[in-house]
Amino acid sequence: MCAIKSFLISLGVEFHPSGHRTWSEEAKAHLVAQTLEPGATVKAVAERYGVLANQLSAWRRAAKDGELVLPSGAEDEAVFAPLVICEPEAKPEGGTVSDALRIRTGDVCLELPLDTGASRIAEIVQALRAAAC
């Protein structure tokens, strides 16, 4: 159990003296992603990490409702990510460089800060691909 506790601490789970745990969004997403692997069950994953199966099921619902972003590589329906929808813009004259990264697909335009990490961009692209299916 010590290895599991260390792993959970690395994901941001806080352990309180009372035995209560505060789960980070990253930890929740990691556990939900494990339930989506072929052959995995909510019950087995819940037992492995000492969480109630109904709590893990609630996190799965949150992911399906777009309230919890799963790590890239999760193999279920869509990976949800917050999107900003904007109107298509005309190209600026003079070729000035934008201060945002733009991803366009159809009528949807996403604007991300230039310092957005590659893993976050990959998650968003994966979500867009899944939504297009």
Image (cartoon, helix red, strand yellow):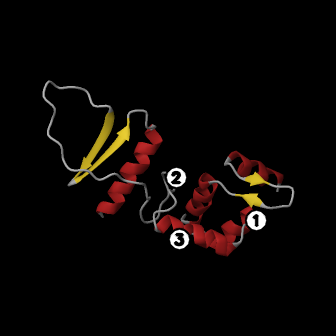
Sequence-wise, the earlier of marks 2 and 3 is 3
Pointer 1 or 2: first along the chain: 1
Q: Position of residue 99 (x, y in %)?
A: 32, 31
Q: How many tags in the picture?
A: 3
Which three-letter amino acid code belongs to the residue tagged 3? Answer: Arg
Please identify the quarter of the rendering in which residue 106 is found: bottom left
Which residue, given by chain and number where applicable, does mark 3 sit on?
61
Q: Which residue is mark 1?
A: 50
**Could you say where residue 112 lies in the image, as x and y percent from the top left?**
37, 41
**Residue identifier under label 2:** 71
Residue neighbourhood size for the residue with mark 3, other residues' Cα within 10 Å, grouped as few (<14), some (14–19), many (≥20): some
Q: Amino acid at mark 1?
A: Gly
Q: Secondary structure at mark 3?
A: helix
Q: Residue at x 36, y 60 (%)?
A: 130
In the foreground, 98 or 29: 98
Viewer-proximal residue among 20 and 122? 20
Question: Which residue is found at the position 43% from the left and 49% from the top?
Answer: 123
- For this view, does 22 lie left or right of residue 131? right
Comparing labels 1 and 3, the label whose residue is closer to the camera: 3
Q: Position of residue 27 (x, y in %)?
A: 64, 55
What's the CA distance linking mark 2 and mark 3?
A: 16 Å
Where's the N terminus, which quadrant?
bottom right
Residue 19 visible in the current orientation = yes
CA–CA distance in space, label 1 to label 3: 19 Å
Q: What secondary structure is marked by label 1?
A: loop
